[in-house]
């Protein structure tokens, strides 16, 4: 599973990070770090929750 990050949409709500700080990394200003994320095995469920929790729809999950 991968998470595609649309950095332009991120408004720095930090919900993704609050749910899974080991997967989602924020910069000093609280915006998500640009670049797609490879979700480690076993972390798919929490990563999916974080994707759905983003109020800006800045995150999208893709399988594989
Ligand atoms: S939850 Fe969405 S808006 Fe908030 S930091 Fe994460 S990607 Fe950005």
Image (spheres, helix red, strand yellow):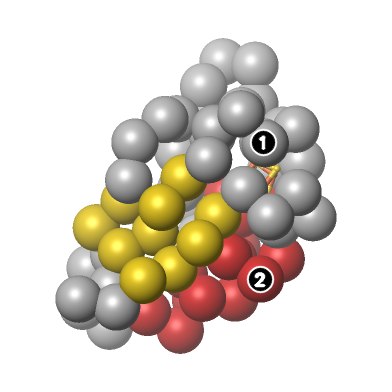
- Compare marks 1 and 2 and give the one earlier in the sequence: 1
User: Where's residue 27, x and y in %?
Assistant: 51, 22
Answer left or right for 8 relative to 47.
right
* Residue with the mark numbered 2: 52
**How would you rate the neighbour count of disc 2 (Cα within 10 Å): few for under 14, some for 14-19, many for 20 or more?**
some
Which quarter of the figure is the N terminus placed in?
bottom left
Q: Please report the residue visible at 69 percent of the width from the left and 55 percent of the height from the top.
A: 57
User: In screen coordinates, is 56 left or right of 17?
Assistant: right
Residue 27 vertical position relative to residue 55 in the rendered view, above or below: above
Q: What residue is drawn where x is 39% and y is 59%? A: 3
Residue at position x 53%, y 40% from top? 6
- Seen from the viewer's position, the closer of residues 29 and 58 is 58
Picture quadrant where residue 61 is located = bottom left
Q: Is mark 1 within 8 Å of ligand 1?
A: yes
Among all residues in the image, which is located at the extreme top? Answer: 28
Q: Which residue is at 29% across, 78% downward?
A: 63
Q: Which mark is residue 23?
A: none
Question: In the rendered image, which quarter contains the C terminus?
Answer: bottom left
Circle 2 sits in a helix, a strand or a loop, which is it? helix
Q: Is residue 10 left or right of residue 45?
A: right
Residue pointed to by mark 1:
10
Query: Which image quadrant shows ligand 1?
Result: top right
CB contact under 8 Å: marks 1 and 2: no
Quick one: SS at disc 1? loop
């Amino acid at each position: 599973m991968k998470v595609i990050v649309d950095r332009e949409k991120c408004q720095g709500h930090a919900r993704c990070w609050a749910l899974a700080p080991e997967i989602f990394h924020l910069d000093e200003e609280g915006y998500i770090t640009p670049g797609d994320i490879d979700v480690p095995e076993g972390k798919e469920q929490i990563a999916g929750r974080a994707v759905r929790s983003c109020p800006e729809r800045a995150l999208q999950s893709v399988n594989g």
